[in-house]
Amino acid sequence: MSESYREMWSQLGLNLEAHDALLSVLGGAYGDIYLKQTNRPSAMGYFDFVMTEVHGLRVKELNDARAAGRKVVGSFCVFVPEELILAVDGISVGLCAGAEFAFDKAEAILPRNTCALIKSAFGFSLGKVCPYMESSDLIVGENTCDGKKKAYEEFGKLVKNLYVMDLPQTKSEPAKALLKAEYQRFARALEELAGKKITAESLKAGIRTVNAKRRALRRLAQARQADPAPVSGLDALLVNQLFFFDDPARFTDSVNKLADELEARTKQGQGVFPKGRPRVVVSGCPMAIPNWKLPMVIESAGAVVVGEESCVGERGSRWMTSEAGDSFEELLVNVVDRYFNIDCAIFTPNPSRLDQVKKMAWDNKAQGVIHYGLQFCQPYQIESGNVARELEKAGIPVLTLETDYSQEDVGQLKTRVEAFVEMIGKGEKR
Ligand code: BJ8
């Protein structure tokens, strides 16, 4: 693919040499982790294709759309409503990165003890290796955790087009009013960017499109409740990751085809792994492409990941936006109502997340939960204590892990995960 897209990458201002190095690592990791899996559903072929073209064809589509007058909006958080972006005929893309790249440059700006997700956004920008960042007409940062909040002050000096959205930190009525005011401000900013007015019709169409995507992901999530699991956790994670990149209608269609195949597999009693394999829910920080380390370790240890209580997973797709209402104002309230449910660990207190982790473990018949906290992520690491206590009260074994994007701790992670999988496989409680 590389040769045919070089001119586009060069026009986007990418550092071609560094980008080649990144693509070669990405391609190697994908081959080793994904393509060596056996017994994969045939519908995963589409997602393999999207993945191999993630810096190629999809970026070309975005830039063709820009040439035709559409705007691309990049973002780092599931609080940025795609419904509003679609309502101005814009295209939403995720910018979180899951790889260590140019961390030395990032650490010249950010303290070393900043989480890898933030450092990697800086590294990708400073290293000029992210075609999505360079294709974005607007980049939306959001005031969530302290790390992101303060980092955007610096990020605004690296990119010309940063828009910062303020977000609530509690679930009170004034906090909800803040979210509504911020979404109204965002809607105006999008209208200005696109030179188009958001109408009730365009917003309703945007809501329908995003709901269809989420409904397809719900089907995938439900299919994973079967034992034997009809799809690996790695493959399901990839689909959840591509939610943030692919064309919405094509993605929905492809996820529905995958869900059809998984439901048929289950009817025939077929699974990707044998029945009775230990089942695990992963809960915590989001995993952006190509952060596949932990699910790879878990599934290599003989378990199957049957759900992700994460923004790249359940937390990103679980609620629908109501399509009821005929005015912009009514529909905007529906958008606010939907997003205000998100139980990210930046909220205080955050009891609904604890209930949700438990519910996912029960619904997915998981014998254990692995809590994944990125190193230096205070919200998720501190909340991991509450998650562990709640699960223990419910008799669900939990393993709390802290890691980053490096490969240095893989051996250590393997040892801990293997012991946990062995324990839950024997039905022991911790
Ligand atoms: S809604 S989870 S996508 S903020 S890992 S940067 S929390 S220090 S990513 Fe997130 Fe929106 Fe919340 Fe979801 Fe900070 Fe933690 Fe880093 Fe994090």
Image (cartoon, rainbow, N blue to C red):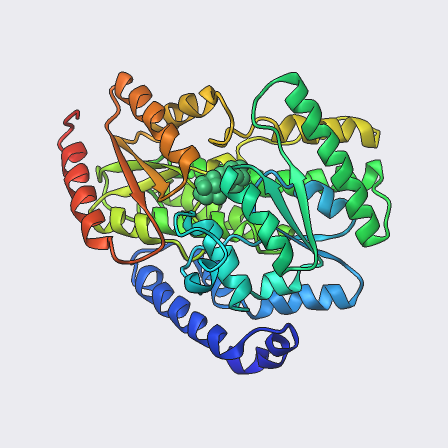
Give the number of callouts: 0
In this rendering, position of residue 328 left or right of residue 73: right
> Does 14 sit above or below residue 379?
below
Residue 91 on image: x %, y %: 69, 54
Residue 161 visible in the displayed image: yes
Q: Name the residue at 65% across, 48% down.
A: 140
Q: Name the residue at 14% across, 38% down.
A: 422
> Does 78 sit above or below residue 195?
above
Residue 245 on image: x %, y %: 57, 55
Residue 295 on image: x %, y %: 32, 48
Residue 150 on image: x %, y %: 55, 44
- Residue 426 appears in which quarter of the rendering? top left
In this rendering, position of residue 283 left or right of residue 85: left
Residue 252 visible in the displayed image: no
- Residue 172 appears in which quarter of the rendering? top right
Q: Name the residue at 30% across, 21% down.
A: 389
Q: Nearer the viewer, residue 53 or 353?
A: 353
- Residue 198 appears in which quarter of the rendering? top right
Q: Nearer the viewer, residue 227 or 268?
A: 227
Quadrant containing the C terminus in the rendered view:
top left
Q: Nearer the viewer, residue 151 or 375?
A: 151
> Does 54 sit above or below residue 201?
below
